[in-house]
Amino acid sequence: MALLRKTIAGALLLTVAASAQMAWAAGKSKSGPPVIERGRYLVRITGCNDCHTSGYAMAAGKVAEEHWLTGDRLGWKGPWGTTYPANLRTFMAQMTEKEWIDFARTAQSRPPMPWYDLRAMSTEDLRAIYRYVKASGPMGEAAPAYVPPEQEPQGPFILFPQPQK
């Protein structure tokens, strides 16, 4: 009888401990798998939101995550013309993971996009970013189209100085 009580008590203790562990883990991870959390972290620290999330830099990063990476209508004008930060959520929604990695490895965008930094990222980091963006789902509309240097952009833009000779 004593052995049966110890066995039942041990089983109950294990069940309670396992339940507490699962509750702790569920509270710790808000959105799922570690690769998605890694993607969120990378998007936050690599500066993706600084351009690709409207108002992010001006709000010191206090923009609701649901609006992250939806592009911006603020242009970047320089000798190359005027470029706009793409809506990465709709852009990447059309790609497979392999297409995204191939794109990231060969991208050579107009300024101010640091395409050279994108190319330097590890495959694991690119996968994590892709999976985070994919898990976030498409939202918003496309950014304005590129404006050639001889045309004046409509709407607000940041003017880059001409390079010194």
Image (cartoon, grey):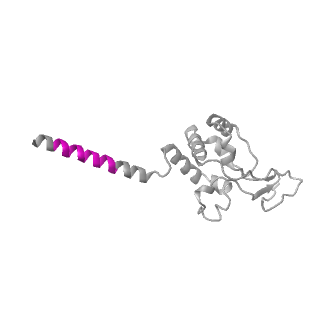
Q: Main secondary structure of the magenta part?
A: helix
Quadrant, the N terminus: top left
28 vs 19, nearest the viewer: 19
> From what the image shows, is residue 114 above or below residue 72?
above
Quadrant, the C terminus: bottom right
Rendered location of residue 149, percent (x, y): 86, 52
Q: Which residue is painted at 63% across and 56% down in the image?
A: 67
Question: In this figure, what is the number of numbered marks?
Answer: 0
Rendered location of residue 90, percent (x, y): 68, 47
Left or right: 15, with 47 as reference point: left
Q: Which residue is painted at 65% across and 52% down in the image?
A: 69
Rendered location of residue 144, percent (x, y): 78, 53
Q: Which residue sits furthest bottom?
A: 59
> From what the image shows, is residue 123 above or below residue 39?
above
Rendered location of residue 30, percent (x, y): 48, 52
Left or right: 78, with 95 as reference point: right
Q: Which residue is painted at 81% across and 57% down in the image?
A: 162
Q: Which residue is painted at 42% across and 50% down in the image?
A: 26
Q: Which residue sits furthest right?
A: 150
Q: Which residue sits furthest left?
A: 1
Left or right: 147, with 54 as reference point: right
Q: Is residue 10 magenta?
A: yes
Q: Which residues are magenta?
A: 6-20
